[in-house]
Amino acid sequence: MDNKILIGRKDKADFPELSLNDIDIKIDSGAYTSSIHCTNIKEIESNNEKKLKFTLLDPEHEHYNNKEFTTKNYTSKLVKSSNGISEIRFMINTTIIIFNKELPIYLTLSERKEMKFPVLLGRKFLNNKFIIDTTKTNLSYRLKTK
């Protein structure tokens, strides 16, 4: 087991660089990449420099803060969605706090308004760190609130 952490099928995590705390996450070993729900995703050019602009979540979400983010640190990636259709998505590098540890994570930006969970953690992030027990939930959040 090599010091892998037991994680359930869903939990809550913090994303300090994105000003999000206790955000619902779904553990999805079927997904390769991790993703976060965003709206108004636009690539812009300012001072001869490309930047990515986006708003996290949407007004109906309880953690929505109407804060617009802009970053130069992004890439794009071809992602196959759950319906089997491939699309180009923007991807950012940020940090996640889970099980009281701050870890680097790549998140693709995706319109997930119709989805129950605003964040999916895919196997690229989960590999070699976690073991999934689908009978458990909120293991990290319970540790945080002890």
Image (tube, rainbow, N blue to C red):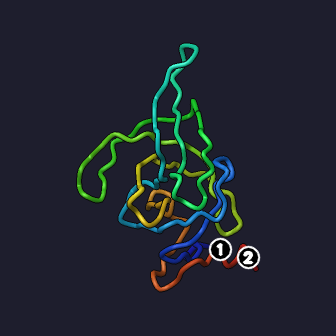
Residue 145 is labelled as 2
Left or right for 13, reference 59: right
Residue 22 position within the rendered picture, expressed as x and y whole percent measured from the top left = 64, 65
Residue 141 is labelled as 1
User: Disc 1 on helix, strand or loop?
Assistant: helix
Residue at x 40%, y 67% (from the top left corner): 29
Looking at this rendering, what residue extends furthest in the left direction?
84
Q: Are marks 1 and 2 in contact (CB under 8 Å)?
A: yes
Residue 29 is labelled as none
Residue at x 50%, y 63% (from the top left corner): 126
72 in relation to 2, above or below: above
Q: How many marks?
A: 2
60 in relation to 90, above or below: below
Residue 62 position within the rendered picture, expressed as x and y whole percent measured from the top left = 58, 62
- Distance CA(mark 1)–CA(mark 2): 6 Å
| Amino acid at pointer 2 | Thr
Q: Residues within 10 Å of mark 2 (few under 14, many from 20)?
A: few
User: Disc 2 on helix, strand or loop?
Assistant: loop
Looking at this rendering, what residue extends furthest in the bottom direction?
135
Quarter holding the N terminus is: bottom right
Looking at this rendering, what residue extends furthest in the front direction?
60
